[in-house]
Amino acid sequence: MLYEPVDDKFKDECGVFGIFLNDPENDTDAARITFYGLYALQHRGQESAGIAASDGHRIQLQKGVGLVSEVINPDHIRNLTGHIAIGHVRYSTTGQSGLVNSQPLVFHYLNGMVALAHNGNLTNTVEMRKRLATYGSVFQTTTDTEIVANLLARYSQDKMEDALAKCMIDMKGAFALVIMTEEALVGVRDPMGIRPLCLGNLNGNYVLASESAALDTIGAELIRDVKPGEIVVINRDGIQSIQVINSPRNAHCVFEYIYFARPDSTIDGMNIYKSRREMGKQLARECSDIEADLVISVPDSGTASALGFAEEAGLPFEEGLMKNRYVGRTFIQPTQKMRELGVRLKLNAIAQIVTGKRIIMVDDSIVRGTTSKKIIKMLRDAGALEVHMAVASPPTRFPCYYGIDTSRREELIANTMEIDKIGEFIGADSLTYLSMEGMFSALKNSRDHFCAACFSGEYPIKIES
């Protein structure tokens, strides 16, 4: 039976986490802390989850399809003994979903055992698979993460950091890697820093995570972001930093600031909530001619921008839409009646707030436009006089190849319609997108600081044909 996801959004990539405890007697604390770290990163992937732990002699693994709480239970934590652990939550980008492609991947090679968790996407996957297969590599999954494992095995005559340095030269694309041997924890970030990775301190123990919110959850302090092109090696001797590649520019994923990351995270020195609020303020400046009574958001990802919009426009902010936060991963049968019900399972208009009002509805982005259309109809059915839609990002016209599951280009509504036609399609009285210039102004950085290829089509790394 076919199922259709309710959300009309880009899908989060993956989340990675790792911890090295100096005290080997804390034989289950590493896995337990990793469990909570993954809980904090659950928004980045809901298809599968896993934790691997090392006691200094061997690596044990527990992973499965589902949410963190569905895959890892207290018995698993008790069995995942060791003072080092890494974890992963996944949404499939390269490779199909399912247990075989869930992470961490654990494998044996010349120097022992290695566990590997990856966020991102390699752009030279086909080339690397052919090359490695020529050398005799065998692949058991369809994920590009296994390419990293095979490269590590190929360079196994070198020390881990030297082998990884060679891997970084071979790999093209976006990657944040958390790697664990029996005795060490390693973090790697791609040369342009497209995918995020940060370093924290928990009572003298080092932690790696996709977002700083995961550090906050376990009570750790953010030290800094792992630098683009850097390898960080953590073992009993402390921490070692190796700058392998110095790229002439950064290309941090701008969609982390628009939608993916948690609002309470700080990535590459920029707080997500403040960034979204500033984008909302700039959006209000760009559509100051709209007359309205109040501002609402499409919760939760549009809320920070809506608050900024309301503040700048001098309009009241109200919760005109209420989100059901207990729906979880919702998939519905593909009948028209069920599709219409699907949005109402997650959102409901508050008639007492919107009846008789001219509304500006702020959302972070529009992908296909189908959900926006249903929400606007819902608001009108609840009594709204006018619904003006304001989007706190530019029109999304191009797919992402760097670790985000986006639609094919022909499915992106901004690629097939002009803005006024999109407004007509979704049933809005007006539609305004944040301009590219306004977005970068709100983020207080130049274009060269970000990857914004989904808006501009200018890809910082060559895409394999």
Image (cartoon, rainbow, N blue to C red):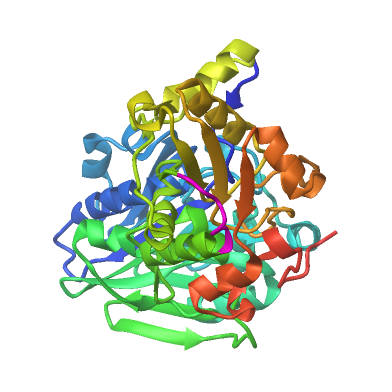
Whole-percent x and y of residue 59?
Answer: 37, 54
Residue 315 seen in render = yes
Residue 276 left/right relative to 402: left
In the rendering, at what x and y percent does residue 388 appear? 56, 42
**Is any atom of residue 405 visible in this view?**
no
Residue beneath the point at 57% across and 65% down = 253
Image position of 27 (left or right of 464): left
User: What residue lies at 51% left-to-right and 43% top-to-bottom?
Assistant: 102
Query: Is-magenta flag for residue 291?
Result: yes
Which part of the image, by quadrant, shows the N terminus? top right
Residue 382 place in picture, x, y as percent: 45, 22
- Residue 303 or residue 5, whichever sits in front: 303
Q: Is residue 208 left or right of residue 464?
A: left
Tell whether 261 sits left or right of 84. right
188 to 1, vertically: above or below: below
Magenta stretch, overall SS:
loop
- Which stretch did the figure color magenta? 286-292
Q: In the image shown, does 371 or 113 lie closer to the viewer? A: 371
For residue 234, above or below residue 181:
below
Q: Residue furthest right?
A: 465
Between 146 and 68, the residue placed more toward the observer is: 68
